[in-house]
Image: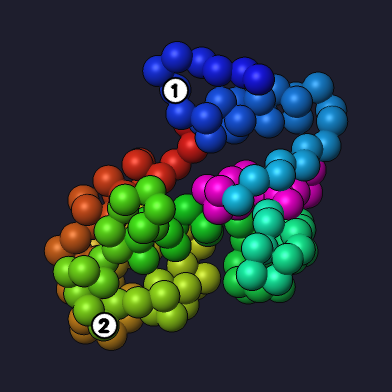
Amino acid sequence: VIKVDGHEADDVVATLVEQVLKKGFRVVIASPDKDFKQLISDNVQIVMPLPELQRWSFYTMRHYRDQYNCDPESDLSLRSIVGDEVDGVPGIQNLVPNFGWKTALKLVRKHGSLEALLNAAAVRTVGKPYAQDALKNHADYLRRNYKVLALK
C-alpha cells in the first residue's frame, strides 16, 4: 500500500504508472475508476469490473478506439464537457440542455482535444449555434472542469 499525504490515490497511481513506463515496463491498472482511462496507451491498459455482467472489462488502446472512435487522450476532454457525477463535476448540459454526449463526442473527434475545440470556437464556427455559443460563453467553465478531472 502506497499513500502520499495530501494527494488523491488516482494521482499517486498516475505517478507510479509514469515511473514504471520510464523503466520500460507495460502497465495494467485494475480499478473501477474511469478516470484511469485517460492513461490508456500502447503500454497501459485498464481492467475494470462490470458488476452488472459479473465480469471484468479490459480497455486497451484498440478497445477504447473501437468503443469511442477516438483516442484515450480525448476521454478527459469528453468528461470535461459532459461532466462526471462520481467526481462531482457538472457537465455543460446543466447550462446548455441540448449539449450532450453526442455533440461533445462529435466535436472532440473533429478537433482532438478540449483546448483545440475551444480555440477553434473562439475564431470560427465549429457547430450548431447552441454549441458554438456554449463553447464561447462557457470556455472558462470547461477549462476548470478539465483541470479538476486531470490526473496529476
Q: From the viewer's perspective, tell me whether residue 57 is left or right of residue 93.
A: right
Relative height, residue 114 to residue 94 (above, below): above
Residue 125 location (% of width, % of height): 28, 77
The disc, 1 or 2, on the residue closer to the chain's N-terminal end is 1
Asked whether residue 107 appears in the rendered view, the answer is no
Amino acid type at circle 2 is Asn
Q: Residues within 10 Å of mark 1 (few under 14, many from 20)?
A: few
13 or 119, which is in the foreground?
13
Where the N terminus falls, by quadrant? Answer: top right
Relative height, residue 88 to residue 19 (above, below): below
**Which label belongs to residue 98?**
2
What residue sits 71% from the left and 44% below the top?
30
Looking at the rendering, the stretch of residues picked out in magenta corresponds to 33-47
What residue sits 22% from the left and 79% below the top?
97
Determine if the magenta segment contains residue 70. Answer: no
Q: From the viewer's perspective, tell me whether residue 37 is left or right of residue 62.
A: left
Kindly identify which residue carries mark 1.
7
109 or 44, which is in the foreground?
44
Q: From the viewer's perspective, tell me whether residue 141 is left or right of residue 118.
A: left
What residue sits 51% from the left and 15% below the top?
4
Residue 91 location (% of width, % of height): 30, 63
